[in-house]
């Protein structure tokens, strides 16, 4: 990926996974810009809306999520690279697949992110 900054996609993915598996909110939040916009259908249940804006809103949501899932553990399966963005494909402790898409600003901080979770088959 050609950008004004250098992000090693696999290093970022490993740090992201390690942060989540540590359940350390400061470590998790370290990658995100103060004005981050995050989208997830799962946020609707805990935060009351599917789009969260800003560090504080995202931190509150993830604190609730971690509290509700003390056994939470992620395992990165693959990393896809785009222009100033990347997608992490991962599974959780229940073997459910999910992705998280990250858009980076000029400083290499995530300013937009979105999570997608494996759909339930009918």
Image (tube, rainbow, N blue to C red):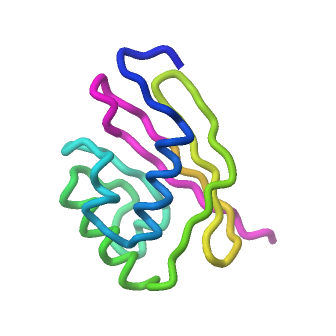
At 50% across and 42% down in the image, what residue appears? 11
At 36% across and 15% down in the image, what residue appears? 4
Q: Quadrant of the C terminus?
A: bottom right
Q: Quadrant of residue 47?
A: bottom left
In the image, farthest residue toward the right: 122
Region in magenta: 102-122
At 25% across and 50% down in the image, what residue appears? 53
24 part of magenta stretch: no
Left or right relative to 31: residue 94:
right
Placement of 71 over or under 11, stated as above or below: below
Placement of 4 over or under 90, stated as above or below: above
Left or right relative to 49: residue 88:
right
108 part of magenta stretch: yes
Q: Quadrant of residue 29?
A: bottom left
Q: Position of residue 21 (x, y in %)?
A: 47, 69
Q: Quadrant of residue 46?
A: bottom left
Q: Pick the residue in front: 56 or 78.
A: 78
């Amino acid at each position: 990926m050609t950008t004004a900054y250098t992000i090693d996609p696999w290093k970022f993915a490993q740090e992201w996974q390690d942060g989540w598996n540590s359940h350390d909110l400061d470590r998790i939040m370290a990658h995100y810009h103060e004005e981050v916009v995050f989208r997830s259908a799962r946020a609707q249940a805990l935060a009351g809306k599917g789009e969260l804006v800003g560090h504080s809103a995202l931190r509150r949501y993830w604190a609730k999520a971690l509290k509700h899932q003390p056994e939470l553990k992620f395992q990165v399966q693959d990393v896809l690279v785009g222009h100033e963005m990347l997608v992490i494909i991962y599974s959780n402790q229940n073997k459910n697949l999910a992705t998280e898409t990250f858009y980076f600003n000029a400083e290499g901080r995530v300013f937009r992110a979105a999570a997608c979770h494996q759909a339930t088959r009918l």
